Amino acid sequence: MAHRTLLEDVISNACSAAFQDPRFHPLHERELSNISVEVSVLSVPQLLEYDDFEDLLQKIVPDIDGLILNHKGQQGTFLPQVWEELKSPKEFLEHLCMKAGLSPIIFEEHPSIYRYRVEAIEDSFDAIEAL
């Protein structure tokens, strides 16, 4: 859910991704000429009602849906772009569980799943710099 303007959010998230993501070394100036930027604007997440895991698998739309999994304070999200790597709904959900620090058997407890869509805007660094 949005808690600041889109511009503030883009700036904050870009700086975090470039310099504060513990999975990667901070971005260096010499890398700037090789950067492309993609901004994903998310729709408002909607709770996805489902009866069981099989029903959930049927309701997910590959390549379109981004998902948020929330269970007892643990949360993870995958943008729709993750479908490029995780092709099946089952695999997508299993990896989403792992990202949230949960076991895939968590679906026996019926965790909250939210669906959202994304408008992705991509450009090269040169075009962004010109702005």
Image (cartoon, rainbow, N blue to C red):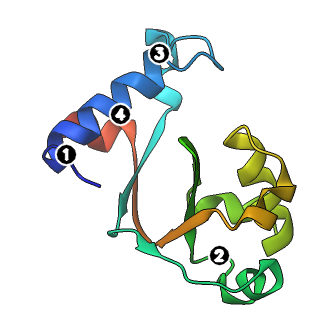
109 above or below 20?
below
Which residue is the site of mark 2? Answer: 63
Callout 3: helix, strand or loop? loop
Location of residue 46 by image quarter: bottom left
Name which residue lies at 53% across and 79% down: 48
Q: Quadrant of the C terminus?
A: top left
Q: Disc 3 designates what residue?
A: 20
Mark 4 → mark 1, Cα distance in angstroms = 13 Å
Residue in the picture at 53% in, 41% down: 73
Percent across and percent down for residue 88 are: 84, 73
Estimate the spatial distance between the alpha carbons at disc 2 and disc 3, rounded to whole Å: 28 Å
Amino acid carrying label 3: it is Gln
Give residue 3's mark. 1
Callout 3 crowding tier (Cα within 10 Å): few <14, some 14–19, many ≥20:
some
Name the spot of residue 37 as percent of width and height, x first. Answer: 43, 43
Q: Is residue 22 visible?
A: yes
Compare marks 4 and 1 and give the one earlier in the sequence. 1
Percent x, y of residue 126 = 33, 37
At label 4, counting other C-alpha atoms closer than 10 Å, the crowd grade (few under 14, some 14-19, many 20 or more) is: some
The span from disc 2 to disc 1 (Cα, nearest Å) is 27 Å
Do callouts 2 and 4 mark residues in contact (Cβ within 8 Å)? no
Task: Give the amino acid at mark 4.
Answer: Asn
Q: Nearer the viewer, residue 82 or 59?
A: 59
Q: Can you tell which mark lies on residue 128?
A: none
The residue labelled by disc 4 is 13
Specify which label sits upstream in the sequence, 2 or 3: 3
Q: Which residue type does callout 1 highlight? A: His
Disc nearest the viewer among 2 and 1: 1
Q: Are marks 2 and 1 in contact (CB under 8 Å)?
A: no
